Image (cartoon, grey):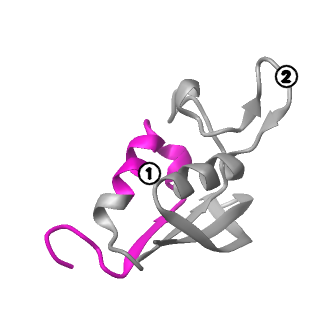
Amino acid sequence: RKSGVFVGGKKMENLLCRLPDPMACLDALPHVVNKGGVVVMVTPFSWLEDFTPRSKWLGGFRDPVSGEPLYSIDALQTIMEERGFEKIHDEEMPLVIREHQRKYQYIISQATAWRKQ
């Protein structure tokens, strides 16, 4: 690491859909990851207005004009490519969150890896 830039990469788990402004985070990535570095993101894309204003969601809703679904993974791909990252891995990843002794959440997150060009 030198001058706030991560040569190897960054890992973001269950974060993107919990930020008040996910684009601000994605916009910062080209400035903190060196060429050849990798960003790994694991997210269920479970957008909630408790965390992120609907106007800041990256997909996860229907287009108000066409009614077609706008998928978060498609939005993420476009955004990352526009910022100079190439997708090098994509898979579904199961995750269990324990809420308390008798309650768990089972989630399938999207795990992607992006290499900075």
Q: Residue at x 44, y 51 (%)?
A: 26
Residue 36 found in image quarter: bottom left
Judge by depth and name the residue closer to the eye, 16 or 69.
69
Q: Residue at x 65, y 46 (%)?
A: 75
Judge by depth and name the residue closer to the eye, 38 or 42.
38
- How far apart, in angstroms, are the residues tagged by discs 1 and 2? 27 Å
Furthest residue in direction top, as rendered: 65
Judge by depth and name the residue closer to the eye, 31 or 61.
31
Mark 1 element type: helix
* Residue for badge 2: 66
* Residue for badge 1: 26
Magenta-colored stretch includes residue 108: no
Mark 2 element type: loop
Label 1 crowd bin: few (<14), some (14–19), many (20+), radius 10 Å: some
Magenta-colored stretch includes residue 3: yes
Q: Earlier in the sequence, mark 1 or mark 2?
A: 1
Please provide the residue range marked out in magenta.
1-29
